[in-house]
Amino acid sequence: VQLVESGGGVVQPGGSLRLSCAASGFTFSAYAMNWYRQAPGLEREWVAGITADRVTLYADSAKGRFTISRDNAKNTLSLQMNSLKSEDTAVYYCNARRVIVKADYWGQGTQVTVSS
């Protein structure tokens, strides 16, 4: 199983970034997919999720600014982040979860830095 995040970087406040997660080694379409983030000194927090049925959910901090999507044909998860703020600075992690088989997979993370 592999989850490989990409798309992180440094962006100014108000800017945008698009994160991607390439998945392999499991049946991507059957899994709920999530984005989490962890800022320095803080616990990892859930940002957004999309179910196998494409129902999307967002943390309050992400609502209206972030959009999660999945491409089952390409086994790819994305997170479009707009109107970025300094408090969005964190390492962003891709997560695949399927409770019925007790599967919970994580990527290595990609750094997002929002700074002027």
Image: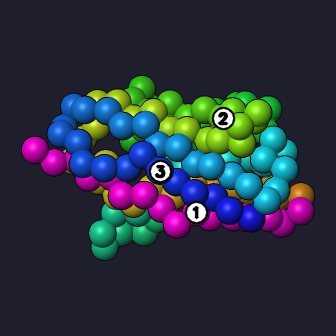
Which residue is at 84% across, 50% downward?
Answer: 27
Total numbered labels placed on residues in the image: 3
Q: Earlier in the sequence, mark 1 or mark 2?
A: 2
Tell me which residue sits at (83%, 66%) in the image. Answer: 102
Residue labelled with disc 1: 107
- Measured as percent of width and height from the top left, residue 43 is found at 42, 69
Does residue 108 lie above or below 5 as drawn?
below
Specify few, some or many for label 2: CA neighbours under 10 Å numbering under 14, 14-19, or 20 or more.
Answer: many
**Which residue is at a point 68% across and 62% down the rendered structure image?**
2
Q: Are marks 3 and 2 in contact (CB under 8 Å)?
A: no
In reply to whether residue 63 is colored magenta, the answer given is: no
The crowding category of the residue bearing disc 1, from other C-alpha atoms within 10 Å (few below 14, some 14 to 19, many at least 20), is: some
Residue 94 in the image, given as x and y percentages of width and height: 57, 55
Residue 50 at least partly seen? no
User: Do tag 1 and tag 3 residues touch (Cβ < 8 Å)?
Assistant: no
Alpha carbon distance from label 1 to label 3:
10 Å
Amino acid type for the residue under numbered disc 1? Gly
Q: Position of residue 110 (x, y in %)?
A: 43, 58
The span from disc 1 to disc 2 (Cα, nearest Å) is 16 Å
Q: Can you say which quadrant of the picture contains the C terminus? A: top left
Q: Secondary structure at mark 2?
A: strand
Residue that sits furthest to the left in the current view: 116
Point out the residue furthest to the right here.
100
Q: Is residue 22 left or right of residue 75?
A: left
Task: Read off the magenta span.
Answer: 101-116
Mark 3 element type: strand
